[in-house]
Amino acid sequence: MDSPEQRIKIAVQKTGRLTDHSVELLERCGLTLTKSKDQLIYYGENMPIDLLLVRDDDIPGLVSEDICDLGIVGLNVVEEKRLNLEAGGNAGLFKQIYELDFGHCRLALAAPEGTEYSGPESLEKSRIATSYIGILSNYLNKNNIDAETVYFSGAVEIAPKLGRADFICDLVSTGSTLKANGLTEVEVLLESEAVVIQTQAPLGADKQALVDKILQRLDGVLQVRESKYIMLHAPRSGNDEKVAVHAVCRETVFWETLENLKAAGASSLLVLPVEKMLA
């Protein structure tokens, strides 16, 4: 059995919008996982890889401190941790190595409906509630805006109603929460998605080879997420002989597409989902 030092440890969000996607993605990469009794660890049965289920805010720190080799977390969390470390005169000992194309959201400024907003200058001398002090402060500094940041750890959208802030800076997905609280999005500070980060500590040849294998498999799974495998028989030009055509389409295959192919002489059309692909 592999010793704990030989096993790859991946930090994953314990609960939230990235949890199920992250675990499912790794299972599609060939991992067979068993959850521990305390529900905090997934053990890899067929590969020396374990998933640690933790708070998403802790993931960059666990990777930076080399407690975990990899982490799957939102770019918003990575950027906030990096900026906070830099503000303290330190550097995060982790690097972003892969974008996962799920968990899309944006960190945005929002204001009560009816608020006049004509750009960053409208924030001058205002109070802005947020849990993303690092990203917001960096934005204000870059735009030479003098504004007060008010820290809120949760329910940021109610800060204007409480008289605590003029604007808020928070994660937005559909915008329904903003609308329900009478707020309007006015500026996007960061487009976010789930990313993979890796410790900057040397992993050793065997561990790095395993990390490279997992990343290659991630690429193979993500490349074909919306892809379809198409098979059909098409006539040769000038005679009735037909040839088999196989193709991978990375866009939705509509009924109209198939009908147009059939009208052009194709037959035996078959469309199948694609699970994996290695270039």
Image (cartoon, grey):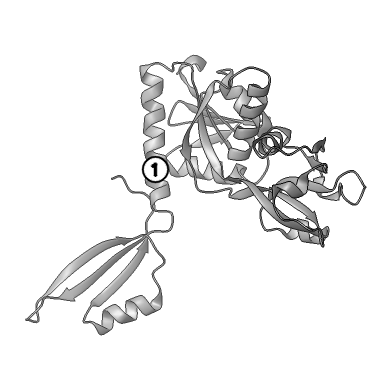
Q: Which residue lies most toward the bottom here?
A: 263
Q: Residue at x 68, y 51 (%)?
A: 187
| Residue 40 in picture, x, y percent from top left | 65, 30
* Total labels drawn: 1
| Residue 272 in picture, x, y percent from top left | 36, 63
Label 1 is placed on what type of residue? Asp
Q: Is residue 14 above or below residue 115?
A: above
Front position in the image: 124 or 253 = 124
Is residue 104 visible to us here?
yes
Residue 234 placement: quadrant: bottom left
| Residue 95 in picture, x, y percent from top left | 50, 27
Front position in the image: 5 or 33 = 5
Q: Is residue 195 left or right of residue 277?
A: right
Q: Residue at x 40, y 74 (%)?
A: 254
Which quadrant, please, contains the C terminus? top left
Which quadrant, please, contains the N terminus? top left
Determine which residue is flagged by label 1. Answer: 219
Q: Is residue 64 left or right of residue 183?
A: left
Is residue 39 visible to us here?
no
Q: Which residue lies most toward the right here?
A: 162
Front position in the image: 147 or 36 = 147
Front position in the image: 258 or 33 = 258
